[in-house]
Image (cartoon, helix red, strand yellow):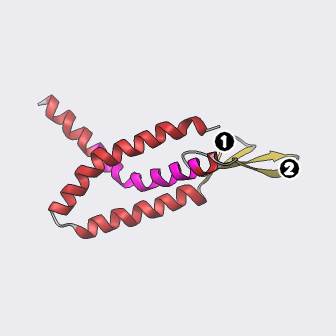
């Protein structure tokens, strides 16, 4: 299923945290914008909890996946009844860890987009 996504998602999350996260944190602390930092932390934790424990989405008419971006389980419609399939350990723990870490990193995405646009603008001028 989505287990092949675990390693690239971990890599992307760590890369964002070590590059953009480090710069954003340094900028926020230097400017003493502590409410902004607290808001980012609270938003990251809320998104992480939702990604890990509450997110469900459909993949066609007969399959619903649990968790995002790495599915930790699924429901399949069989004979007009939804049957639940849970991912075996240790993949379940890895999937939930990847989902939680991705949720924590999501508030950094606007900073990464701003960095990208600033780089492109600098190269064009």
Percent position (x, y) of residue 14?
A: 38, 45
Percent position (x, y) of residue 48?
A: 48, 58
**Of the numbered discs in the image, which one, if any, rests on residue 59?**
1
The image shows residue 125, relative to residue 55, as above or below, that is above
Q: Is residue 75 left or right of residue 104?
A: right
- What residue is shown at x 34% (from left), y 62% (from top)? 40
- What residue is shown at x 41% (from left), y 40% (from top)? 12
> From the image, which quarter does the N terminus lie in?
top right
Percent position (x, y) of residue 10?
A: 46, 43
Residue nearer the viewer, 122 or 100: 100
The image shows residue 32, relative to residue 89, as above or below, that is below
Q: Is residue 119 left or right of residue 47?
A: left
Q: Secondary structure at mark 2?
A: loop
- What residue is shown at x 23% (from left), y 50% (from top)? 23
Outermost residue on the left side: it is 125
Q: Earlier in the sequence, mark 1 or mark 2?
A: 1
| 26 in magenta | no
- Quadrant in the picture for residue 41: bottom left
| 96 in magenta | yes
Q: Is residue 113 left or right of residue 118?
A: right
Percent position (x, y) of residue 120?
A: 21, 33
**Of the numbered discs in the image, which one, if any, rests on residue 80?**
2
> From the image, which quarter does the C terminus lie in?
top left
- What residue is shown at x 88% (from left), y 46% (from top)? 79
Q: Secondary structure at mark 1?
A: loop
Which stretch is magenta? Answer: 94-113
Local crowd size for mark 1, using a 10 Å CA cut-off: few (<14), some (14–19), many (≥20): few
Main SS, magenta residues: helix
The image shows residue 34, relative to residue 18, as above or below, that is below
Q: Tell me the distance, in whole angstroms, between the alpha carbons under discs 1 and 2.
A: 16 Å
**Of the numbered discs in the image, which one, if any, rests on residue 82?**
none
């Amino acid at each position: 299923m989505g287990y092949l996504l675990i390693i690239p998602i971990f890599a992307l999350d760590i890369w964002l945290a070590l590059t953009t996260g480090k710069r954003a944190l340094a900028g926020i602390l230097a400017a003493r914008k502590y409410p902004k930092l607290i808001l980012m932390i609270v938003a990251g934790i809320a998104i992480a909890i939702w990604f890990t424990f509450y997110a469900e989405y459909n993949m066609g008419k007969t399959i619903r996946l649990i968790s995002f971006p790495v599915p930790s389980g699924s429901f399949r419609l069989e004979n007009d009844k939804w049957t639940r399939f849970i991912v075996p350990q240790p993949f379940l723990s890895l999937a939930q860890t990847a989902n939680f870490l991705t949720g924590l990193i999501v508030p950094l995405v606007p900073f990464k987009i701003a960095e990208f646009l600033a780089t492109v603008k600098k190269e064009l001028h």
